[in-house]
Amino acid sequence: MFGFGNNFPDFTAGRTFQETYKCYSVTMLGDREDVERGGKIIMPPSALDKLTRLNIQYPMLFKLTNKKSNTFRETHCGVLEFVADEGRIFIPYWMMRNLCVDEGDFIQIDNVSLSVATYAKFQPQSVDFLDITNPKAVLENALRNFACLTQGDVIAIKYNDKEYELCVLESQPGKAVSIIECDMRVDFAPPVGYKEPEWKPKVQDSLDGVDMEADTADDIQSFRPFAGQGNRLDGKKKGTEASSSGSALCGPQRRGIPNYNFKRGTITFIRSVRPATNGNSEAEEEKAFEAFSGEGKTLKKKTRT
C-alpha cells in the first residue's frame, strides 16, 4: 500500500571493495595444487561478508596491486574460497612473481568488472612447448582454472607433470579480460629461443640452372641402355652367344628369329635340316621342298572336240 521501499536511499550503491592484505603463497596451505595451477586466490571470510553487502557484479573479479616505491605491478584474478586467516590472502606462486612480492608483503585488492575476452595471444617461454601435440586443447583445459587474463602476465600451466610458462602478449577487447564462459580465439607466437630451420635447396632446384640443351646429338646417340656384361648364376664366365646371335640377324634366316626382309605377297617355308632317310642328299631334299614355293600357275582343262 505504501511504497516505503523506494524512499530509502541505497547507501551501498556505488561503493566498491578495496582492502589491503598480507600476501602468502599457496604452499603455506599445504597440498593445494588446484589453487597453484589456476588463477584464483583464497581470501578471508570477512572479505565475503563485505562483498555481500555491496552492489557488485558476479562473478567476483579482483585487481591485485603492488604499490611499492620501487615497482608498480598489477594483475587480475578470481576468488576460489574464503577460508584464509584474517588479514591474509593466498595466491599462486606464478602470480607472486608477476607482482614482484615476497612472503608477507602487502597487496591491495579492488573489486573490478571486466569485459568478456574475444581474443588472446600467448608466447611460450620455452621451446619445450612445441613438444605438445595439441597445444590449443592443452591450453583450453588449463584455462578452466583461470578467471582473468592480463597483458604482460606470465601464467603457468602443467601438463604431463611438467610446468610450462606462457606470456600473455595480447588480449581483446582490453588489457584485462574475463575468460569465464566465453568464446575466445587463441593464437601463439614463436617460443622464446626458437629459431627457424635453415632452408636447404633440393637436388631438383640445383639442377634447374643446368642447360639441358647443351647435350649434343653425338652424346644422345652414344647412349645405350642396358649396356654391359652379364653374369651367369653358376659362376662361369659368359660366352659369346649373344654376339653370335646378333650377327645371325644379318645371315640366313633361322627358325625363331623374325624375318626383317619380309615382303608382302611372298611366302617362305623354313624347315630344319634332318638326316636323309630316302637315300637323297640334304641338298636334293631342300630342292624338292622349294619346288612348291613361289607363284602358282593356273591349270587349264582341255576339252575334247
Image: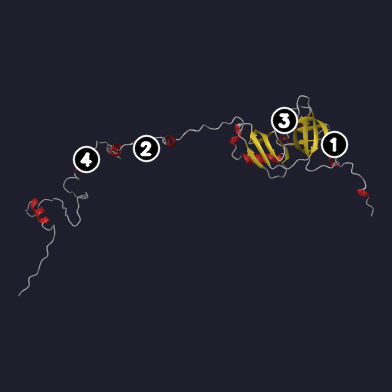
Instruction: Give the mark nearer the N terminus: 1 vs 4.
Output: 1
Residue 46 at x, y percent in the picture? 85, 36
Residue 7 at x, y percent in the picture? 93, 47
Residue on which the image places disc 1: 46
- What amino acid is found at the position of numbered circle 1 in the picture? Ser
Give the quadrant of residue 19.
top right
- Neighbor class of circle 1 (other Cα within 10 Å; few <14, some 14-19, many 20+) is some
Q: Nearer the viewer, mark 1 or mark 3?
A: 3
- What amino acid is found at the position of numbered circle 2 in the picture? Met
* Label 1 – label 4 distance at C-alpha: 109 Å
Instruction: Give the mark nearer the N terminus: 2 vs 3.
Output: 3
State how the image is colored.
secondary structure
Of all residues, the one furthest to the bottom in this rendering is 305
* Label 2 – label 4 distance at C-alpha: 34 Å
Visible residue check, residue 177: yes
Q: Nearer the viewer, mark 1 or mark 4?
A: 4
Instruction: Give the mark nearer the N terminus: 1 vs 2.
Output: 1
Q: Is residue 170 left or right of residue 79?
A: left
- What amino acid is found at the position of numbered circle 4 in the picture? Ser
Residue on which the image places disc 4: 243
Q: Nearer the viewer, mark 2 or mark 4?
A: 2
* Label 4 – label 3 distance at C-alpha: 88 Å
* Label 1 – label 2 distance at C-alpha: 86 Å
Residue 187 at x, y percent in the picture? 63, 39
Which label number is shown at residue 212? 2
Counting labels gives 4
- What amino acid is found at the position of numbered circle 3 in the picture? Asn
Of all residues, the one furthest to the right in this rendering is 2
Residue 274 at x, y percent in the picture? 13, 51
Give the quadrant of residue 107.
top right
Residue on which the image places disc 3: 98
